[in-house]
Amino acid sequence: MRYEKLEALLRVALDMRGSAEGISLEEIQRSYGISRRTAERMRDAIERVFPQMEQANPGEIPKRWRIRSGPVGNLAGVSSEELVALTTAAQIAKRDNVADLSARLETLAAKLKSLIRPEVARRIGPDLEALMEAEGIALRPGPRLAIPNALLEDLRHAILACKKIRLHYRARGTGKLSRQLVCPYGFLYGNRHYLVAYSLSEGISDYRLFSLANIEKIEVQEAPFRRRRDFSLQTFAERSFGVFQEDPLDVKWHFTPQSAPDARQYLFHPTQVFEDQSDGSLVVRFRAGGALEMCWHLFTWGDQVRIIEPKQLRTMQRQQLRKAEVAQRQERRDAEARAEPD
């Protein structure tokens, strides 16, 4: 228990050192689930050890505390596991073709390594090499969409500066080129990478996804925009099963006893609830849009999963199965025709 209290004290000190705005007693209470009095004792103990602690907002309420400089930096040791985590993140970004993010992470890892004392670096070097080998991150095989680094840099600048941009966007389905004025909010990374932006086009005025690979050019506008406080990128992403944004559905799937152990290892959606059945099967519930993407995923489970709700998802799955069967029959006929002698 005493070690846990010491760890909490060190973490609060690091929080104070890493925040220019400072940390309030209320934030310490929430972060560590402690009383007001305990938070005050922790603050006082940190001040005794680090006399350079100061109030970041004199005369304001609530008071916020920070540590401007001093020996606390020596306590913020970098472990081999942490360096591996950072390097692994850089490799995953490179694998997923987010080159500019990968480069930034690699630069950050190099800077952290340069801050480590030589004797410590020699000690953790072998561990770092072994852990990196154990991670086994490999480049994903197959085709990947090429996204220019300059485009990502310009988009990231517009997001941080809250500048409107005009997209030169080519629709994937029709190939039609459009020019749309949008307010960029962030990125969603996956098999395809998307820009999340609020479209100012007439008749839309809503948040939209734009495939980064289909953005041919952007023009950063001088006019700024004000980010909506009620918008959360996380909440926006959780509205859908995959990427497609639709009205959410209350979904209920039933996995057979044979497939239930595998299904329990999946995070189908952040809002999911598992219900174990007496026969060893599993029911999964969640609320999200993206019915077509759900069907695509359920195909991989074959007859080991059954859609209980909603009815429209069951109907869509049957339609998609029929389309797949028709396509397979046509492929067989084409193959047989090619095999016939002239």
Image (cartoon, rainbow, N blue to C red):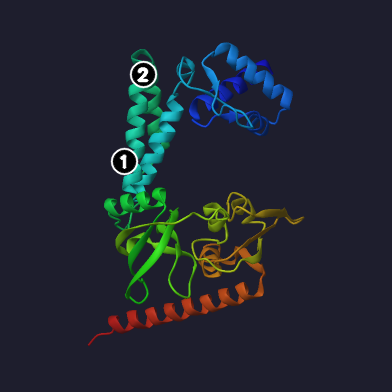
The answer to which quarter of the image holds residue 155 is bottom left
Horizontal side, residue 209 vs residue 143: left or right? right
Asked whether the residues under the numbered discs 1 and 2 touch, taking CB atoms below 8 Å apart as contact, a structural biologist would say no
Which element is circle 2 on? helix
Q: Residues within 10 Å of mark 2 (few under 14, many from 20)?
A: some
Q: Position of residue 271 (x, y in %)?
A: 64, 54
Q: For the residue marked with disc 2, what is the amino acid?
A: Ala
Report, in whole angstroms, how far the alpha carbon at label 1 lies from the one at label 2. Answer: 22 Å
Determine whether 134 is above or below 191 in the image. above
Q: Residue furthest front?
A: 59
Quadrant where the image shows the N terminus: top right
Horizontal side, residue 207 vs residue 23: left or right? left
Q: Position of residue 220 (x, y in %)?
A: 32, 57
Q: Which mark is residue 121?
A: 2
Determine whether 238 is above or below 314 in the image. above
Q: Position of residue 18 (x, y in %)?
A: 49, 28
Which element is circle 1 on? helix
Is residue 68 visible from the viewing direction of this image? yes
Residue named by callout 1: 103
Q: Position of residue 205 (x, y in %)?
A: 49, 69
- Of the two numbered discs 1 and 2 in the rendering, the one whose residue sits closer to the viewer: 1
Determine whether 274 is above or below 217 in the image. above
Residue shown at 39% from the left, 49% from the top: 161
Most foreground residue, 201 or 284: 201
Residue shown at 41% from the left, 29% from the top: 83
Determine whether 331 is above or below 168 in the image. below
Q: Residue furthest right?
A: 278
